[in-house]
Image (cartoon, rainbow, N blue to C red):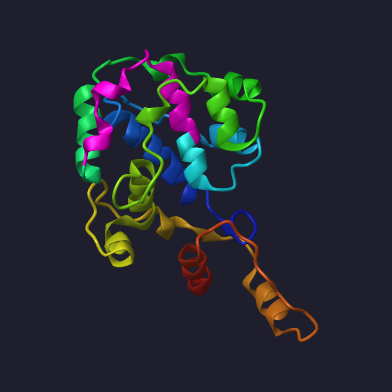
Amino acid sequence: IDGGLIDVRRSFHETIKNTVSYYLKECFNLPVKRQAVFEEDINLIKSLGGFNDDWDVTAGFLYYFASLLPKIKVEELELDKIKDIFSLKQKLKNKIDIREKILEKSDIRNFVSKVKKRGLEGILKATRGKNQELVCFSGDVLKDNLVKRIFQEIYWGVDMFPKIYETKNLFYFNPGKIHKEILIADRLVLKNLFQREDLILSIITGREKRDAEHSLEKY
C-alpha cells in the first residue's frame, strides 16, 4: 500500500517527524525549536533494511538522539513504579533537565553509515544501548508504550483515536495525519484490475489491519 497505492509522506512520515520532535521536547525536556528529522533522514533509516514498521523507524531515531545525551542513571527515575502512561511522560520530563542542544550536533547520515545490522538491533548496537531505557518502546500502547501512544494519537488524531482505542487523547489534540494520505494509483486502472476474472488480486502490507482497511475503504 505505502508508496505503491498511497503516498504516505504527509501521513505516516509526518507522524514519524512529529512524534520524534514531541518526544524530544516533552519527554527528554530538550529545547526543540525546529523539526528534528526530515524526509531524507527517514529514507536513510529505511535504507538499512528491517524498518518496514514506522513505529520502529520512530524508535530508531529516538534511540539515536538518546545516545547523544550524557549518560543518565535510569534507576533514579524509577520508571518501573509508574502506573499510567501520562505519569510516565511527566516523570521523564521532570527528571531529565539537561538542556543539551543535541540537534546541533546530530549527524544522522554519518550515524547510518556506521550501522552494520538491519532494524532496531543495528541501531542499538551502533549506539551501544546508551540511554536506551529512556525510550519507552515496549508494552501496551495504552499503558506504558509511550512512543507508540504518541505516534498513534498523532496518526489517528483527536477525532479518530478515541473511537479506535476507547480512551481520550492525552498528548495530541488536532486532526490526524491519516487524513493527509493521497492516492497515487490510477482509480480506473484499479477498477479494471478488480473487474478482471482471470486475476486474483492481493495486497501485501506492513500496516495493521484497521489502518489498511480504513485507507482501502476511503479510496
Image coordinates for residue 79, horizontal then vertical, percent: 26, 33
Residue 140 percent across, percent down from the top left: 36, 51
Q: Is residue 115 left or right of residue 158?
A: right
Q: What's the magenta bit mostly, secondary-structure-wise?
A: helix
The picture quadrant where one finds residue 33 is top left
Vertical position of residue 120 compared to residue 168: above or below: above
Determine the image quadrant of residue 65: top left
In magenta segment, residue 71? yes
Q: Which residues are magenta?
A: 60-82
Q: From the viewer's side, name the closer residue of 160 and 52.
A: 52
Which quadrant is the N terminus positioned in?
A: bottom right
40 relative to 30, above or below: below
In magenta stretch: residue 169: no
In the image, what residue occupies the spot 21% across and 23% down?
95
Residue 165 found in image quarter: bottom left
Which residue in the rendered view is the most extreme toward the right?
A: 198
